[in-house]
Image (spheres, rainbow, N blue to C red):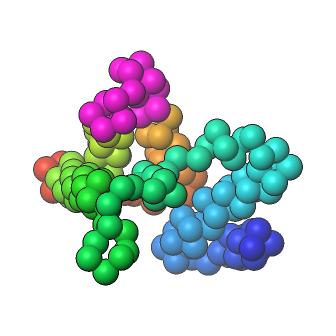
Amino acid sequence: MLVFAVSMTFASLRLPADARIVPLVIGIPTVVLCILLLIGERYPGLLRRLDVSIMESTKESPGSDANGGEYRPKEFTKLTIMAAWMIGFFVCVYLIGFLAGIALFVLAFLLLHARISWWKSLATMVGVWLFIYALFEWLLGAGLFEGIIFGG
């Protein structure tokens, strides 16, 4: 998969600017994640530290339905909360654009949902914002949607 992702990413560089955005957006993270998995095969402790399951679906929850299957009201609640966060992200991007929306969303999510300290939340927000800005605005030269409030 890594060889395929790298070859498709490099092949997309020969495409016109508008046509190569989607292959690069998919290819670059795929290459990074494949490399991370290869490193994780050598150092399994690294992958254990990066294991972040939103739903924690591997843990069993008590209770079952009438058919003998698992009934997981806590997981449904978590799924609903995640869906609400995603809808909030889409609304945020639509209103204020990608760059401002991503910064605001990451900060809000980390503070309100993940309950991470202000310092770590701000540092993460700045890192994510710089990565998105550098990748799309600077490296790819693709202007991101500015939102309807800021004239997009």
User: Is 52 placed left or right of 71 in the picture?
Assistant: right
Residue at (31%, 80%) from the top-left corner? Answer: 67
Residue 32 pos. (x, y %): 68, 55
- Of residue 152 and residue 94, the one placed in the foreground of this image is 94
Residue at (36%, 40%) from the top-left corner? Answer: 106
Quarter holding the C terminus is bottom left
* Residue at the left extreme of this rendering: 149
Q: Quadrant of residue 94?
A: bottom left
Range shown magenta: 110-126
| Camera sees residue 20 | yes
| Camera sees residue 146 | no
- Of residue 83 and residue 107, the one placed in the foreground of this image is 83
User: Is 37 placed left or right of 49 in the picture?
Assistant: right
- Inspect the magenta stretch and tell me whether residue 115 lies in it: yes
Residue 6 pos. (x, y %): 75, 68
Residue at (26%, 59%) from the top-left corner? Answer: 73
Residue 36 pos. (x, y %): 72, 52
Residue 34 pos. (x, y %): 72, 61
- Inspect the magenta stretch and tell me whether residue 31 lies in it: no
Mostly what secondary structure, the magenta segment? helix
Q: In the figure, 124 relative to 78: above or below?
A: above
- Of residue 31 and residue 52, the one placed in the foreground of this image is 52
